[in-house]
Amino acid sequence: MAERKKNPKKKPAPKKRGKGRKAPSLVERAVTGLRRLIWGVCFGLLGIVLLATLIYAVVPPPTTPYMFSERSRLGAVSYDWTPIEEIAPVMARAAVAAEDANFCLHWGLDVNAIRSAMDRGRGGASTISQQVIKNAYLWHGRSWLRKAIEALWTPLSEAVWSKRRILELYLNIAEFDEGVFGVQAAARHYFGVDAADLNATQAARLAAILPSPKNRSASRPSPYTRDRAAAIISGAQTIKADGRADCFEN
C-alpha cells in the first residue's frame, strides 16, 4: 500500500501589523478639553441651581441680591420673615388677584398672558413664580439674559416648591417701599399692625403699590392706588369664590 503523504503543517500567516492611531493634534486636544470644560461648567451650574432651589423649599432666604444691594446703598433694610400661617389670608388673595389671578392654574409661565402682552406690543406678563425667581436669585433691570434664565428656572421651582411656598416667598421678599421688604415689615411700616392683622382694604392697598412701590404709597394712596385697591378687593373675593385660591389656601 502506498504511503499516505502527510500534509505539511501550514505555517500561520504572519500577523499584519496594524497601523498605529495617529496622535491627536494640539488643536484636537484643545477642542476636546474645551468641550469637557463647557459640559463641566453646565453640569456644575445646573447642580448649583437645583441645590439653591431645594434649599429655599425649606429655608427662608437670609437675603436676596437686590436686598443686599439696597442694604449697601441705604445702610439698612427692614426684612422680617413671616410664615404664611401668620399672614392674613386676605393678603395672600389680594397679592394673587393683583399680580397673577391665574396663579393656581399655570405651571410658572402664563402662556396666554405672555401671548396677550406680545399682541399688545408690551413686555411684562411675569407671573408670581417668575417674580420670586427674579427677586430671590437674580438681578433687577431689563435684560434678555435675565428673562431667559428666569424662564428656564421658573418651571424647575414649580416642580420643587408648592404653590403655597411660592406665594410665601413672594410675600416675604417683595419690596413694598424703599428698603422695606416683605409683608410683615410693610404692614408695620404703613399701618402699624402685624401681617396677621391686615384687613381687606389694607391688604389691597399693599398689593396695589406693586410692582412700583417706590412711586406709590399704601398709607397715602393716590386716586389711582385707591381705584386699583378697590378692584383688587373685588378680584380677591372672586378668586376665593371660583376656586382660584385653593392651591395656596388648602
Image: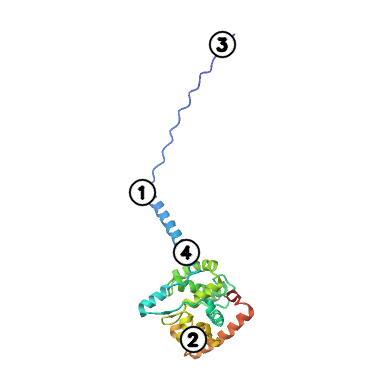
- Residue 29 spot, x, y in % from top left: 38, 49
Q: Which residue is mark 4?
A: 51
Toward the right, the furthest residue is 242
**Quadrant (top left/top right/bottom left/bottom right) for the N terminus:** top right
Query: How crowded is the residue under tag 3: few (<14 C-alpha within 10 Å), some, or many (20+)?
Result: few
Marks 2/3 in contact by CB < 8 Å: the verdict is: no
Mark 3 vs mark 4, foreground winner is 4
Q: Earlier in the sequence, mark 4 or mark 1?
A: 1
Amino acid tagged 2: Val
Q: Is residue 238 left or right of residue 125?
A: right
Q: Is residue 126 visible?
A: no
Q: Which residue is mark 3?
A: 3
Which of 224/240 is in front?
Answer: 240
Q: Image height check: is 89 above or below 153?
A: below
Task: Give the alpha-carbon distance from disc 1 to disc 2, as whole Å.
Answer: 69 Å
Query: How crowded is the residue under tag 1: few (<14 C-alpha within 10 Å), some, or many (20+)?
Result: few
Mark 4 vs mark 2, foreground winner is 2
Marks 4/2 in contact by CB < 8 Å: the verdict is: no
Mark 4 vs mark 1, foreground winner is 4
Task: Give the alpha-carbon distance from disc 2 to disc 3, as whole Å.
Answer: 121 Å
Q: Which residue is mark 2?
A: 193
Query: How crowded is the residue under tag 2: few (<14 C-alpha within 10 Å), some, or many (20+)?
Result: some
Q: Which residue is mark 1?
A: 26
Amino acid tagged 3: Glu
